[in-house]
Image (cartoon, rainbow, N blue to C red):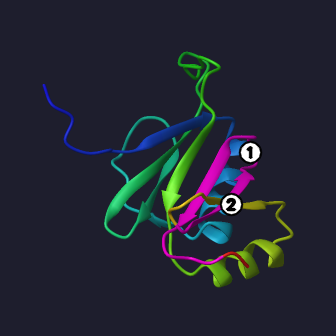
Amino acid sequence: MAVIRFSHYNLRASADLIEALRRFYTEVIGLQEGPRPPFDSPGHWLYAGPVDLLHLTVAQEERRAHVSGTFDHVALACDDLEGTMRRLNAHRWNWRQDEIPGQGVVQLFLRDPAGNGVELNFPGGSQA
């Protein structure tokens, strides 16, 4: 077996938290909601362009989330650093900025409504 690409990641939570996550990842981060197969459990698939990047699934009693306690963050390659900072500020979302030394990649770090770490990377960006 050889891994050929990253497929997606899934967040499983209560219906209320899934709705908060859906709003965060679409309204604040900029993913788009798209088609999702007709699974038995409710949820959403969020896309970056044509790729279903994030699956949000409402947790069912019989199938709880698989939590190992080691997940730290997801990193997303992005563009429009200034526009993203404006959008985060407009939503009053807390974030911090850093840069990868020697690579010119600006990073914005924040937490989603469930407390998961989100890293937004902007190649070729300059610190604001």
Residue on which the image places disc 1: 16
Q: Is residue 91 left or right of residue 10?
A: right
Circle 1 Cα neighbour tier, 10 Å, few/some/many (<14 / 14–19 / ≥20): few
Is 98 in front, or is 94? 98
Residue on which the image places disc 2: 24
Q: Amino acid at mark 2?
A: Phe
Whole-angstrom CA distance, mark 2 to mark 1, is 13 Å
Residue 121 vertical position relative to residue 45 in the rendered view, above or below: below
- Report the number of discs: 2
User: Looking at this rendering, what residue extends furthest in the front direction?
Assistant: 102
Q: Amino acid at mark 1?
A: Asp
- The region drawn magenta spans 104-126
Q: Is residue 118 magenta?
A: yes
Residue 45 vertical position relative to residue 116 in the rendered view, above or below: below
Per the image, label 1 sits on a secondary structure element best described as helix
Query: Residue 84, how many percent across, how many down?
Result: 66, 76
Residue 3 falls in image quadrant: top left
User: Looking at this rendering, what residue extends furthest in the left direction?
Assistant: 1
Query: Residue 21, how many percent across, how many down?
Result: 67, 51
Is 116 in front, or is 55? 116
